[in-house]
Amino acid sequence: MMTDSDTPTFANPDGTGGGFDWWRQRVGFVLGPLAMGALLVWPVPGVSPEAQRLAAVLALAVIFWMTEAIPMAATSLLAPALCIPLGVAKDKEVLAPFASPSIFLFIGSFFLAAAMAKHGLDRRLALWLLTRRGVLRSPFTLYAALGGMTALLSMWMSNVATTAVMIPIALGVLATTPQLAARPRAQADLILLIAFSASVGGLGTPVGTPPNIIAIGFLRQLTGETVTFLQWMKLGVPLVVVLMIFLLWLLRPRGVVFTDRRVMEMELCRQRETLGPLRPGERNTAVLFSLAILLWMWPGLSDILNGGPTASAAWLTKHLPEETVGLLCGLLVFFLPVQLREWRFTLTWKEAERIDWGTIFLFAGGLSLGTMIFNTGLAKAMGNGMSAWLGTPGLWLLVAAGIGLSLMLSEATSNTASANVMVPLMIAVAQAAHLPVIPVALAASLACSFGFMLPVSTAPNAMAYGTGLVPLTRMMRAGIALDAAGAAAIFLVVWLYYR
């Protein structure tokens, strides 16, 4: 439930930014205003004055997002704010998307994830899985359990928080396993499996990673189309399963045989025992997570089980839409006590202040720009231009083009920034070509979560590289393979679902 916009950048020993980042930021700092100025001065044929001024602001935003010349969240506030004095739209119109219901789904889910991390429920779940019978039967079953739990957690938590939980567990496993410790390739592959699984798992649910909610928000805001929680999971979960199977094949431990599983079992059981019994904070968080998941999925499940619309599903959809469920369950962490006599609750506001507000601003700013792109007619012009470039694309050619462009962009910038650019663009192209918008938008948003080649591509990649166990060349080779498999899998799953 988080972007990679806060991906750590690597520093030189003297504490300054690395060479690539140093140049990237400074070039962007100069290039962004130059591009904006050029578009303000030279007219663009076929667009209104408001659309041209918006194009100038959008150029600044895209360059600043890609180069991180200033913090990405600041860019997402600056760009919409510039639209007001430039006369693109009135202030109420520009700022209205900052109160979109999707924003509050983000906030509520972040509160739940913060409570889970605070009370250690995520670590308890991971250690519970690893101490199940048969998990340590072979290196492959161990890798499968670690990767599967990482993906499962990442469906509901941020990929960064999930990686932060799972990498120490993986390192502990390596430290107690001489057969793995003696093989650098096996160690690197296990750490990469954790990092990649954290990013892949986020594809499974709308709240798993920001591009998912961005796509849902743009579809609702720009086209009136709705994608429910269960509809997303029917598309996302099979994609996660396919990619996890590929990852386990790609990063499988080769030539490793466990000779003393007892030591490993004792170490993992020791870690689990140190957690003690289930604490009130964990119990409260588990109840709220379970309630949110049930309410998110109930309308769709009820309709499927009963063979058609039901009164209970209709009531929930009307009175408890998905965004409201996320917000209410997230707010209940401030209400459920862990020690009422001491007036201690599941989460405090001081702890909640540390959630990723930058991602929320990044999403809101992108939603504001995307809305204005359509309202000013810029989207139609962009869609017509891309349609002319593609010729007369069929639906599946357009889906493939969106996947390829989104994936390439995600290698250079954060998944949230990529989605803010690509989703409204692909919606516009689909509308210009009179093609269904949902499969095009969803395919592009899913591809925005890829980009696994480099440590700076995603935060989990950076954390994996930071362990010192993953050579850059190994990350690049595995990342390229996962990118290629991901593009193919996205196309296949979307084609099967929408053909």
Image (tube, grey):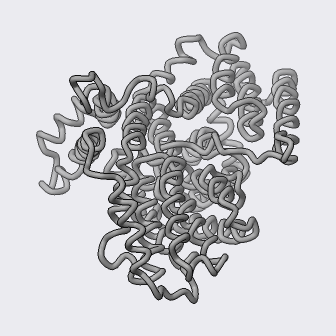
Q: In which quarter of the view is residue 417 placed?
A: top right
Q: Position of residue 2 (x, y in %)?
A: 52, 42
Direction from residue 53 to residue 143 in the image, left or right: left
- In the image shown, does 156 or 370 lie closer to the viewer? 156
**Vertical relation: 297 (above or below) 314:** below
- In the image shown, does 456 or 380 lie closer to the viewer? 456
Quadrant where the C terminus lies? bottom left
Direction from residue 211 to residue 380 in the image, left or right: right
Q: Residue at x 68, y 59 (%)?
A: 465
Direction from residue 20 to residue 230 in the image, left or right: left
Q: Residue at x 56, y 62 (%)?
A: 196
Q: Position of residue 150 (x, y in %)?
A: 45, 60
> Does residue 275 show up?
yes
Q: Residue at x 56, y 47 (%)?
A: 430
Direction from residue 8 to residue 36 in the image, left or right: right
- In the image shown, does 34 or 66 lie closer to the viewer? 66
> Does residue 432 show up?
no
**Vertical relation: 271 (above or below) 5:** below
Q: Residue at x 34, y 45 (%)?
A: 228
- In the image shown, does 499 or 371 lie closer to the viewer? 371
